[in-house]
Image (cartoon, rainbow, N blue to C red):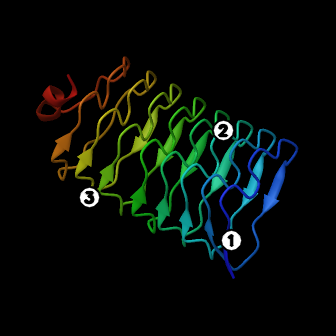
């Protein structure tokens, strides 16, 4: 069938629920951006990509089920979804864009796909309610500011595969206390 075009529903402030039709393979850039009343979206198992800003500033969206078919989530795809609380990512996701969950101030828990090898800049920046993160077993890089401002983040297990932690990756993570000694120097 194809995809939903860029900005197709952008700014539809009265849209509350959406079931994306079977056969859609891509949610385009800004597809639902600014849909301030959007509470739930059903994404079919045919979708392989969620593009840049697809759900940006959908402030009433409280949960999202990402189907096993999704391989990539674009930059700022869920940025500013301030009601989003829990996200579970299927192992099919191998690409997570920069700032993809930035400013999701109610986000408490995230389970990341083991296929993700890099957390890009600002991925979870300003997620001040984030307490629980399961890092992928094969994660190699945590880029600049990935968790900056996650003031409720208390502990995190770092996989042995980590090779680089970027500048300010955990800046402002004032509750973070359980960090292995070999990683601690990279957090300053």
The residue depicted at 63 percent of the width and 38 percent of the height is: 81
Q: Is residue 140 left or right of residue 120?
A: left
Image coordinates for residue 76, horizontal then vertical, percent? 52, 45
Q: Is residue 122 above or below residue 48?
A: above
First in sequence: mark 2 vs mark 3:
2
Distance between the Cα atoms at labels 2 and 3?
Answer: 30 Å
The residue depicted at 47 percent of the width and 68 percent of the height is: 71
First in sequence: mark 2 vs mark 1:
1
First in sequence: mark 3 vs mark 1:
1
The dot on residue 138 is 3
Tag nearer the camera, 2 or 3: 2
The residue depicted at 38 percent of the width and 19 percent of the height is: 175
Image coordinates for residue 48, horizontal then vertical, percent? 54, 71
Find disc 1 in the rendering and name its residue.
44
Find disc 2 in the rendering and name its residue.
57
Q: Is residue 94 above or below residue 78?
A: below
Is the residue under label 1 in contact with that under label 3 (CB below 8 Å)? Answer: no
- Binning the other alpha carbons within 10 Å of mark 2 as few (below 14), some (14 to 19) or many (20 upward) gives many
Quarter of image, res 57 = top right
Report the residue that reaches farthest toward the bottom: 1
Quarter the C terminus occupies = top left
Tag 3's secondary structure?
loop
Q: Is residue 7 above or below residue 152?
A: below
Tag 2's secondary structure?
loop
Report the residue that reaches farthest toward the right: 14
């Amino acid at each position: 069938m194809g995809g939903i075009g860029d900005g197709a529903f952008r700014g539809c402030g009265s849209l509350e629920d959406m079931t994306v039709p079977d056969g859609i393979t891509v949610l385009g850039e800004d597809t639902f951006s600014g849909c301030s009343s959007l509470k739930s979206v059903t994404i079919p198992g045919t979708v392989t990509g969620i593009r840049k800003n697809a759900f940006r500033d959908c402030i009433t969206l409280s949960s999202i089920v990402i189907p096993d078919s999704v391989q990539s989530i674009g930059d700022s795809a869920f940025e500013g979804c301030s009601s989003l609380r829990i996200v579970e990512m299927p192992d099919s996701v191998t690409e997570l864009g920069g700032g993809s969950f930035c400013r999701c101030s109610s986000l408490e828990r995230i389970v990341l796909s083991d296929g993700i090898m890099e957390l890009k800049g600002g991925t979870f920046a300003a997620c001040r309610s984030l307490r629980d993160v399961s890092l992928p077993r094969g994660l190699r890089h945590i880029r600049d500011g990935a968790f900056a401002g996650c003031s409720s983040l208390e502990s995190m297990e770092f996989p042995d595969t980590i090779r680089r932690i970027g500048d300010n990756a955990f800046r402002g993570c004032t509750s973070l206390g359980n960090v292995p000694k070999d990683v601690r120097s990279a957090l300053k």
